[in-house]
Image (cartoon, rainbow, N blue to C red):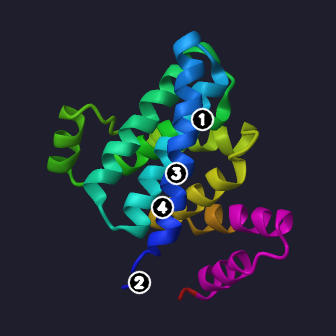
Amino acid sequence: MLSPDPALHSQFEAAIDRSEQLAHARFSKNNQDQDALFALTLSSGLQADYAALIEKHNLASLHYTKEASTWAQQLLAVCSNCYDAQLATGFTKYIIGSMAAPVRWLMRMGGLPADKQGGIADLQLTAEHGRYLAPFARILLAIAYVRDKNKAGALELLSSLHSQFPSNTLFPREIARLQTGH
């Protein structure tokens, strides 16, 4: 297992802290500030990703995931067509909805929604209408489709991503893996 670079982690934390300071300053003046709410959603989402993917701290990641979903819900309450926020709510619903029944129950008790199909629907909204996060939503949907044995859906999304980002070598590699069954 690779160890995270401490210097990069410090830079990441500094950038997160700065963005949160700026967002909270705007939020304190106007609790319906869409940019502040979106920045707080992204900040918590990035922290969740870092905790899960880099540090392998799944409980910390769940905390940040819940936080991102809460900020996203606040944003959606003031801007129903801020489709990028649906990524946070969709990811949370899908991940928790995919867990074993006893874990889902515990997560729901902790305030995390468990709705796998609702999560897919939220991710599809971001994939179709998101301004900034549509490609990321399509990647997450492709992963969900592979997990759910929907190879055709995953191939369609990966092909569209490959068309949009032809220099990215990940998409053709994953398409080939799906086509060959490896």
| Residue 57 % position (x, y) | 29, 62
The local crowd at label 4, few if under 14, some if 14 to 19, many if 20 or more residues have their Cα within 10 Å, is few
Asked if residue 175 can be seen in this view, the reply is yes
Tag shown at residue 14: 3
Q: What separation in Å lies between label 2 and label 4 (alpha carbons)?
A: 17 Å
| Residue 98 % position (x, y) | 34, 53
Residue type, numbered disc 2: Leu
Q: Quadrant of the N terminus?
A: bottom left
Please say whether residue 172 is one of the residues in the magenta stretch: yes
Q: Which residues are magenta?
A: 156-180
The residue shown at (72%, 63%) is 156
Residue topped by disc 4 = 10
Residue topped by disc 2 = 2
State the image quarter where residue 30 is shown. Answer: top right
Secondary structure under the numbered disc 4 in the rendered image: helix
| Residue 138 % position (x, y) | 65, 55
Secondary structure under the numbered disc 3 in the rendered image: helix
